[in-house]
Image (cartoon, helix red, strand yellow):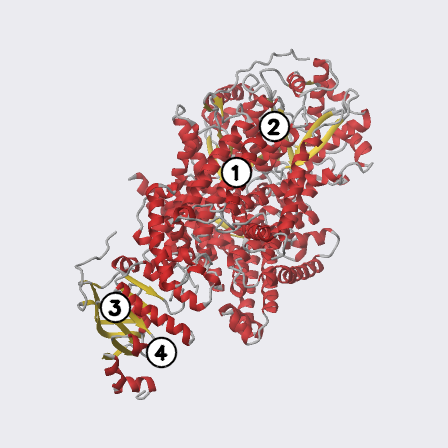
Amino acid sequence: MRLHRVLLGTAIAAATLLAVPLTASAADGIYVPLLSYRTGPFAGSGAPIVNGMSDYLNMLNERDGGIGGVKIIVEECETGYDTKKGLECYEQVKAKNPVVLNPYSTGITLPLIPKAAIDKIPILSMAYGLSASADGTTFPWIFNPPATYWDGASMFIRYAGGKEGGLERLKGKKIGLVYLDAPYGKEPIPLLEALAKDYGFELKLYPVPAAEMQNQSSQWLNIRRDRPDWIYLQGFGAMNPTAIKEAAKINYPMDHLIGNWWAGNDDDARPAGDGAKGYLSLDFNQVGTNYKVIQDILKYVVDKGKSQTPKDRVGENLYNRGVLNSIIIAEGIRNAQKVSGKKQITGEDMRRGLETLNINEARLKEIGADGFAAPMKVACDDHNGHNAAYMAKWDGTKWVKGSDWIEPLKSKVRPLIESAAKDYAGANAGWPKRTEPCDKSS
Amino acid sequence: MFYREVGQYKTNYSADMSVMPLLQDRVGIGIILFIAVVIIPSFGNAFFIQAIMIPFLVFSLAAIGLNLLTGYTGLLSLGTGAFMGVGAYACYKLTTYFPGVNILIWIVASGFFSAAVGVVFGLPSLRIKGFYLAVATLAAQFFLSWCFIRQPWFYNYNASGAIEVPTRTLFGIPITGATASDTARYYVVLGVVVAMTWLASNLVHGRIGRMWMAVRDMDLAAELIGIRLLRTKLLAFAVSSFYCGVAGALLVFQWYGSAEPAVFDVNLSFFILFMVIIGGLGSLTGSYLGAALIFILPIVLRYIPPHLGIPIRPATVDHIQYMIIGALIVLFLIVEPNGLARLWQIGKQKLRVWPFPY
Amino acid sequence: MRAPGGPEVSVGDVLLSVDDVSLSFGGVKAVSNVSFDIHKGEIRAIIGPNGAGKTSMLNIINGFYHPQHGHITFKGKTRTRMQPHEAAYGGIARTFQNVALFRGMTALDNIMAGRSLKMHSNFFWQLLRHGPAMHEEVEHRHRVEEIIDFLKIQEIRRVPVGRLPYGLQKRVELGRALAMEPDLLLLDEPMAGMNLEEKEDMSRFVLDVNDHYGTTIALIEHDMGVVMDLSDRVVVLDHGIKIADGTPNEIKGNQAVIDAYLGVAH
Amino acid sequence: MHLIYQIFVDPFVQMGSAPDLLVQTLWEGLVAGVLYSLIALGFVLIFKASGVFNFAQGIMVVFAALTLVGFYEHGVPAYLALALTIAVMFGLAFAVERLMLRPLVNQPDIILFMATFGLTYFLIGFGELVFGGDPKVMIASQLGLPKGAVEFKMAGGFVSLQKIDIAAAIIASVMVAALAVFFQKTRVGRALRAVADSHKAALSVGISLEYIWVIVWFAAGLVALATGIMWGARSEVSFALEIIALKALPVLILGGFTSIPGAIIGGVIIGVGEKIGEFYWGPLLGSGIETWLAYVIALVFLLFRPQGLFGERIIERI
């Protein structure tokens, strides 16, 4: 009978697998899959993000009955931040012709970049993934607004320069980069190296191996030895709180420790508590609930119990970032409907919609996100926009605005992007030339 | 009833010593191959081929590799992931240096590099045994992953720090890179895996296989009948790593299409080890069964609730799935410590005597 | 591989001689200053009470232990440190006190494994299992089947030895040793734990091996009856010291031996 | 020539020039080492008594810490939460013995090893299901563990010892001492040693294996809890902590799978060794070497002493 059990199991397995395509027939509506990571070592940042994303889209369904009268079909696929599962999710959702995909992991984004053009599914990696993919002429299907990691690093330099009294004052200063030793963490290095040459500061690198995320004493001993004047933290998950605690341990001045926008989770600063007071993190979305869009989410979704977000965590930094991500999706869809004249749009239309994306002050007001984020504009050749961000400051219990909007050093970033894009296309023999025509921005 | 060797007399030793003496087995393999070569590509959808069959075959190959080392030679290794990594990175370096040469050649050639690395890290196996050796192989795992991350030479100094797969063709048909069709990738993987499985089964049925098993069962006695321990163990490491290396190359070039170093971390090693142990130590069939159970079962579990229309969050499914897998592993070990392969044997036995209980 | 071949030894000459060999573990002396020799074609018994150092003696002869002092001369070649597999190539085979078979393998494979050192087809033919490799397999299978017939274990060919009864395991182990076509066969208590019938079978096998294959045999055995019947010459060890050496009849009458067995004088 | 200088001279010059950093590095290494030893201790306890290579030790650390914080977050006062967690760990030990070890008794080691993988998976799923995957803040201060640091000037620089680390060191030593007493003096402890030597023998003199196994798994659970609290306090309580457990493996090779003092001393050697190596020699190799340095140290060591620092000698006879 053991045999029978095995046979039965195999039968069920086979049946289920062959049944998978059946679900592929998405009902009438715009299918927006969300790759989530509510599990695994990075769940801490994954959960709020995907909560924000789904809540906003559901809010649109509840409030306006979708976009342009078409319901949005929101479906999560759990990746656990594991590339293997991510690819499986991709294959699964691909069958249901999604209009856009948010991989939410650099590891998953990289393999999807070449696939996007083939499968005609735009990839929206909001301020993560491959910086070079901001070059629309090489990567027509990849979008990473509002800013690339390189913009982020340049904003950090700009901010530091400002505090020192002018970028030229950075000459001879030591600037440290504490980063997760993985492609994600390494992203800012090329730009910082370039800027180090231009402004004559010394760049010190402190890689933190993934396995040592919570065991960083050696890196911070090095920092204590080198005494860098400023530190940029390109960390993730459990690495950030550890780094902040270690910084506090060696009495590093918190207002000189600046995290990129993925080092701005409430869970990152909270464990260090008062020790983290004054810690700064780049940010391109505002924190808190006193924005109409967040209020609507509370009103139509959370209070109606149609969300899995605990009410007290609505308005947290990464939650709001999720919301912003969905705003971009929604605006993209709206644009797509405009340029294509169709209600039920395809991935192809969505690509055009995103390429003509232009969320200006007025538009932000309309969607109730007045001052919630900086205006952003994406163009055919520029899939990022290199938009402004600001410094969020940890006051010991929550994030507060720590600076005005900071524009990136676009003149420095852009050339690097283009050359990097060229390298990428060169390295990947047979990289397709852009054939997609450009719509003019709306 | 169905599975009778009665009347199948062997009149000479070579026939008697063939890998599959029984007609039924040969027919069975024939059917399986037919399904794999004809049915699946023509009826399986993209998801089935790209997300299930290709990974399944890749993992099976890796599992066979580890099984040759752990199952046949009795050397427990936790470095599989790294050895697969060596294969992948070797293949990447080779094809970027010599884009002209056919990628298939490089995929196979990459195996030799991981074999060499495997031999180096296999050297301690003469003095170290059991779990001590297992932990020692972790040194390989962590050192190699460190190389992939910290030494830019491995990923050609590119900005992303990951390796990307260029498009390469076979007879003008792209078989790697994004433009390669699922079917094309599938056939390449299938071809390589089937061929290497055949070679492996030849190996384990012959003198070398006997020497490996002798070392596994009682290394001292093996030495006293004239088997050189170090040589035999190193050969096992080399062949095993070769298989893992090719599997790694296939993983990146035929499945992922791009990989960051984290892909080859220690978890991959554990993953493959599960397959080998659950599938059955010292059985090639077991390697396939193990890969199927460990890799495909979670996917199935994931899709069952939506099909039954159970409103349950993906994350929760994921959690429960972990619990089920964990529980199943323990259960399997309790029910049949010798793995699925043994269950398979029992199954065949039952078929032999069917319809009678015994 | 360097197999210590040496000049061919003809019947009656000294095949192996042990000269003044001592071995000790830490403080414990297992063997001290023992010398004896084994003539080609004879059956040589090594006896003595428990802990007399008999098994250690065999372990020294086939290179598993290395004596601190003294040396071994085999086929006219003298060596102090020899690796077990060198011994095997030299033509020394061995069975063990507590059976040392490859439990996971079938009887057939166990005996085939015994022929590993006689098979030389290269790795790549092995991969293909064709040409030389297959030819070799078949040829050696013939030899192995002869041994299987000789030991009358046809019906258990394909049974994993782990499942066999003790008596049969001993027989398979003998088969594995014979498969090596040794010049010198070391048998460590081949009849231990056997009933009378099995003992008689085993004794017959030992004798047959001796005159059928002309193999020189050194055996350790406790059953005096068996020893006296089988062996041409007997060497007696006690507490690692050689106390007697001679034909069975001489040994029978030897006072020292009797004392040792009766435990007099200590 | 320059390289030789960098390898053999420069690091020592640095040590001399900034003794405060040297002391700090040694201290950090010591603390890390102590925590490695704690995890290794968990392994050793179980391996000694049941021959099981318990891969689940790492997840037990996470699980224990999560349970503790979880209770607290549900309004249970800290110390009560601690007590409850201890109870849970006992329950776990009991369940493991009943559902996993007993049915698998007399199976080969690798099978039991594999079973602990199953346990790991189960605990990951269960833990995330119950407590959620998001990281939590360890309730160190609520448990009366000290905060802040003691700093003292030294050779122009300063050395700062985190009070929590000091506490960790003290607690670890206390636990080890307690275990030592437990093993040497109590009846159960002696029984345990007997089991370690030979299961059959133990059975024959009427020692119940089940009972012993529950005890050791419970002990390992307590060790895991301590580790979880300490490490959780250093960063946060999240599933990423599980990775740290792998650090205990080289410690095991170094110390031997069956030796408690081995685990402690091995841990300290590894901890200090890797920190010093990373800090002074890491930059030469492009840093990050501490991920494997420990293993290489252990491996090289192993080639000369296959049974580890204090492990029993393996005598092969035939």
Q: Which residue is mark 1?
A: B30
Chain to which mark 4 belongs? C
Q: Nearer the viewer, residue D261 or B52?
A: B52
Quadrant in the picture for residue A358: top right
- Residue neighbourhood size for the residue with mark 2, other residues' Cα within 10 Å, grouped as few (<14), some (14–19), many (≥20): many
SS at badge 4: loop
Q: Nearer the viewer, mark 3 or mark 2?
A: 3
Q: How far, Cα to Cα, is label 3 from label 2? A: 73 Å
Q: Which residue is mark 2?
A: A127
Position in image of residue A420 (x %, y %)? 49, 22
| Circle 2: residue type | Ala
Residue C223 tag number: 4
Q: Tell me whether the residue at label 4 lies in contact with that at label 2, contact meaning CB atoms closer than 8 angstroms.
A: no
Q: Is residue C259 left or right of residue D44?
A: left
Residue B84 makes an appearance in the image: yes
Q: Tell me whether the residue at label 4 lies in contact with that at label 1, contact meaning CB atoms closer than 8 angstroms.
A: no
> Do the residues at pointers 4 and 3 share their chain?
yes
Residue B79 makes an appearance in the image: no
Q: How far, Cα to Cα, is label 4 from label 2? A: 85 Å
Position in image of residue C26 (x %, y %)? 32, 71
Q: Nearer the viewer, mark 1 or mark 3?
A: 1
Q: Tell me whether the residue at label 4 lies in contact with that at label 3, contact meaning CB atoms closer than 8 angstroms.
A: no
Q: Which residue is mark 3?
A: C68
Q: How far, Cα to Cα, is label 4 from label 1? A: 57 Å
In primary-sequence order, the first of circles 4 and 3 is: 3
